[in-house]
Image (spheres, grey):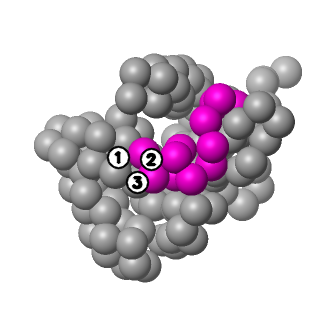
Amino acid sequence: MENTVGLTKDVGWQIGVSRTLPHPPEEVWSFLTSPPGLSLWLGPGATLTPEKGARYDTDDGTTGEVRSFRPGDRLRVTWQPPGWSHDSTVQVVVRPAAGGTSVRFHQERLADVDERAAQREHWRRVLEAIEAALSDG
């Protein structure tokens, strides 16, 4: 039997990765939407205009557009790195949690189980980098 964990009827393959960081939600949100934070999760050189439909691109050629932006809560963008034949949708959600703030990355419209596995590792590394940057700051 094929492994179909993460396969949905509506958005194809998806992945969610989260971590609780020992920092207040306002600090985490501020960092995630700052140039250094955007560079860690969206890509180097990323800048976002917080309005629906605003396009962005990164230094490495990743492109996309803002789908929704709710300050202090969530940000949803399309995301297509170089070499991908399709875009996906990435959402980052920030929530108060015991001991700090829960940060969750959710990505949908992935091509297949292999891309899903690769993105799971990608978002885990991103969360580690975010945690390290906040701890150093």
Pick the residue in front: 11 or 43.
43
Q: Is residue 38 magenta?
A: no
- Mark 2 neighbour density, 10 Å: few (under 14) some (14–19) many (20 or more): many
- Which amino acid, mark 3? Thr
For the C terminus, give its image quadrant: top left
Q: Is residue 43 above or below residue 69?
A: above
- Tell me where residue 28 appears, x and y as whole percent: 53, 44
Magenta segment? 20-31
**Can residue 90 be seen?**
no
Q: What number is the disc on residue 51?
A: none
Q: Are marks 1 and 3 in contact (CB under 8 Å)?
A: yes
Q: Are marks 2 and 3 in contact (CB under 8 Å)?
A: yes
- Tell me where residue 34 appears, x and y as whole percent: 34, 51
The residue identified by callout 1 is 38
Q: Secondary structure at mark 1?
A: helix
Q: Are marks 1 and 2 in contact (CB under 8 Å)?
A: yes
Q: Tell me the distance, in whole angstroms, between the alpha carbons under discs 2 and 3.
A: 4 Å
- Tell me where residue 29 appears, x and y as whole percent: 52, 52
The residue identified by callout 2 is 32
Pick the residue in front: 71 or 15.
71
Pick the residue in front: 53 or 128.
128
For the N terminus, give its image quadrant: top right
Pick out the residue farthest to the left.
59
In the image: residue 117, left or right of residue 82: right
The residue identified by callout 3 is 33
- Which amino acid, mark 1? Leu
